[in-house]
Image: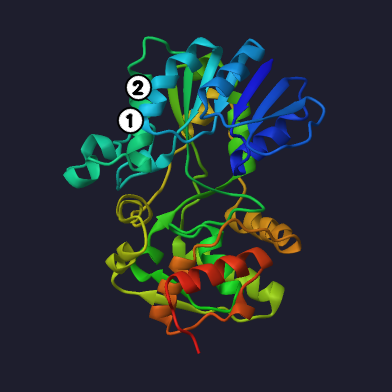
Amino acid sequence: MNILILGGTGAIGRALIDLLKSTSWNVLVTSRNVRENENNIRYVKGNAHEEEFLKQCLEIEHWNAIVDFMAYSTKEFSEKVDLFLNKTDQYFFLSSSRVYAESNIPITENSKRIIDVCEDEEYLKTDEYALAKARQENILFNSSKKNWTIIRPYKTYNDNRFQLGMFEKEDWLYRVMMGKTLVFPKEMAKKKTTLTNAIDVSVAIKNLIGNQAAYGEAFHITTTESITWQNVLDIYIYFLQKSTGKHYKIKYIDNIEKFYEIWNKYQIKYDCNIDRIFDNSKINNVINKSISYTRFEDGCVNCMNNFLDNPSWRRINWKLNFWMNTISNEKIAIWNVIGKREKLRFIKYFFSKYVSYS
C-alpha cells in the first residue's frame, strides 16, 4: 500500500504515522519542516497548499490512499478536489464534528449540520471553520466520484494538546502555569463535551483505509464518554496541583458574550457552548469491531505526565492574556513569562500596546 499524508504533523496525524510504522506500507508525509525518515515513513519538505509542490507529491507514486489533514478555504478546496480524487484509490478528507448543529439526542452521521439549519445570515456569509468544512463536504457529496471518505473528529488530545472549551493549551495552561487566573465562561462549564485520544482516532482511520464500505461515506470518530467542561477542567487542575504542588486560580464569568470581545464568537455560540454527545455505532459497524476508547481521565493523566516531563509551546496569545488580566485584576511581569522566545514576544506586545505596568 502506498499512502500519502498531507500535513500530518498534528495530534491525529502524528498518531496515525506512529501506527503506520508497524506496517509494511510505503508512507510519504508532507511537512513544512525537515524531518528524519524512519523505516517505511518518508518525509518531504514543502507546503501542500502550493500547487506545484502538491502535484509533484501526487506524481511520485500511485497512491492507494491520500489522508488529507490540510485546512482549506472552500475556494481552494473546490480547485483541488478533482486532482485528489483522480490521483488516488481513496481520498480521506479530514472534516470536523464542529459541522453538526445542536442536538438534544446523541449525534449520528445523519444529524443536521449547522449549514443545513442555521438562520444566522451574518454567520452564513462567512467561511468560518465549521461552515467551510461543511461546504467542502458538500463538494464531495455532489461529486460524480465516490472514492472519498469523510472523517469528522471532534476534540482530540495527545501529549502536546489539551483543549478546554475554545482554548488550546497555549491559551489556558500556559497562563495558569505562569501563576495567573484563568478566566472561563460559567455557562460553558456546564455544557457536555467529548474528548478523544488521538491514538484512538488514528486506529479507526487505519481500519478504514482500503475498506470499500467506507467509500462515499462520512464518519465521526469520537468516544461516547460524555463529560462537562467543568469535569474536564477539574481533571486538569487536580492533576496539575498533584504534580506541581501549586494552587491554580479560576474565575468564572456569567456573561458568555463578554468573550466575544476576544474570541471567535461563532465557535463559542455554535460549538463550545452547546452539548456534544455522540453515537459512534456507524464506525464500529463498518470496521466490524468496537474501538476500545481511552477513558478521558486515564488518557489525560498519561498525556499530561509526558507533557510536564518535556513541555513545549506554540505561539502564546498575549492579547488574550492581557484581556484576562483586566478581568482578574492581575499584571504579568517579565519574570512570569515562560521561555526566552515568549519573553521577547511579550515585550514586543507590551510596548506595541503602550501598556504601563508598575
Which residue is the extreme one toward the right? Answer: 39
Question: Does any portion of residue 120 appear in the rendered image?
Answer: no
- Name the residue: 29% across, 36% down: 112
Question: Does any portion of residue 39 appear in the rendered image?
Answer: yes
Q: Secondary structure at mark 1?
A: helix
Label 1 with label 2: CB-CB less than 8 Å: yes
> Is residue 173 shown left or right of residue 309?
left
Q: Which residue is mark 1?
A: 135
Q: Secondary structure at mark 2?
A: helix
- Name the residue: 36% across, 39% down: 99
Q: Is residue 157 above or below residue 218?
A: below
**Residue 255 x %, y %:** 28, 71
- Name the residue: 41% across, 26% down: 77
> According to the image, what is the colour scheme of the structure?
rainbow
Q: Amino acid at mark 1?
A: Arg
| Quarter of the figure that contains the N terminus | top right
> Is residue 149 shown left or right of residue 104?
right
**Residue 336 x %, y %:** 61, 78
Image quadrant where residue 201 sits: top right
Q: Which residue is mark 2?
A: 139
